[in-house]
Amino acid sequence: MALSACIRSTANHTVIFYCTMSALSPLNRLAACRECPRGCGANRFKGPAGFCGTGAGFSVGAVCRHRGEEPVFGEHGVCNVFFTLCNLQCRYCQNFQISHKPRPEIAHELTFQELAEKIRRILAEGSRHVGFVSPSHVFPQMEALMEELSRDHPEPLFVMNTNGYDLAAQIRRLEGRMQVYLPDLKYMDQDLANRFSGCPDYPAVAQAALREMFRQKGPHLVLDSRGVLRSGLIIRHLVLPGQVENSKAALRFIARELSPEVTVSLMAQYAPIPAVAGDPELGRRLSPAEYEEVLEELDRLGMENGWVQDLESQDHYCPDFARSHPFEK
């Protein structure tokens, strides 16, 4: 068996522990990283690099069981791996503690085996799914974990919980290996994507990625005998204050370019984080009238599969990654 590298990154350098695990071979691509649409070409083995500022190791803000917004994952929820940093830098990100230059006590630098064992301990408590949250900039790390965990019995079901800013070619790499795609569709407007997340190409890139996910999974979810999700595509869209037309355009893309039968998770949970508290666009919550207008478009398009949120959800999805479990007090 070929010798592979088990890597732990620190703020100043990368320590490599050699081990005989072929699962780690995807990490070789990080020597000239073009894993996401940014295409930086950075050598991440030399330390934190590229737009995302990420090294070649396994840095996570939390590994925890999380029931999330979609009930179809069942009573045990998902074992979510919250990777630190991101290939977007959304000004309003609710996970800003780990996506925007996380403090050392929040960014946990783990070895490959330490992370795999943390996941296994949570799966042993009853969770069936392993969710990779914001993995677009750590695609090789995600693939390495999938290869390692897929050897287990029972084999877990993998969930790619992504911001949608992914290369379609990368999604094709996952065909037959990723059971559930849980992408965002954030923007349909280039100017909005640039102002809020610094990526004017987001609409085109995300649409191509979603088309590939849809090609693999089709419009319908596959459930087990208990109604728990086994395979499929669920598209999330967060309605932003003052951006009703963007939300309506996102729904029209899904209904007209993919299928009105695609499962959609339409979220009203936006709450301003401290960084945008005084912002004229992002410094307020969504109004009932705005959300109602988006719901009317959902009905008009005949989209009946999925979930919507009450406006009260704005108070329930604000994680604190300084706690051992960011979603539980």
Image (tube, rainbow, N blue to C red):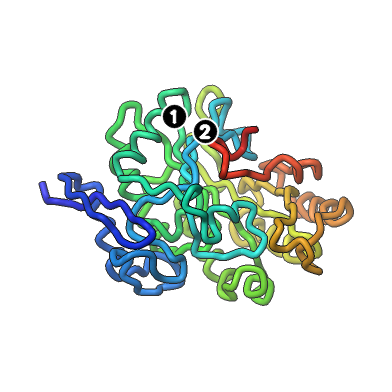
Residue 268, image x and y in percent?
A: 75, 49
Residue 153 position (above or below residue 103): above
Residue drawn 70% across the image and 56% down it:
273
- Residue 294 figure quarter: bottom right
Say left or right for 205 vs 284: left
Q: Nearer the viewer, residue 218 or 5?
A: 5
Q: Quarter of the image for the C terminus: give it.
A: top right
Report x, y in % for residue 164. 54, 59
Question: Contact, CB < 8 Å: mark 1 with mark 2?
Answer: yes
SS under mark 2 = strand
> What numbered label is drawn on residue 65?
2
For badge 2, the amino acid type reads Arg
Q: Which residue is mark 1?
A: 122
- SS of the residue under disc 1: helix
How many other residues sit within 10 Å of disc 2, few (<14), some (14-19) or many (≥20)? many
Q: Amino acid at mark 1?
A: Ile
Residue 141 percent coordinates (x, y): 35, 52
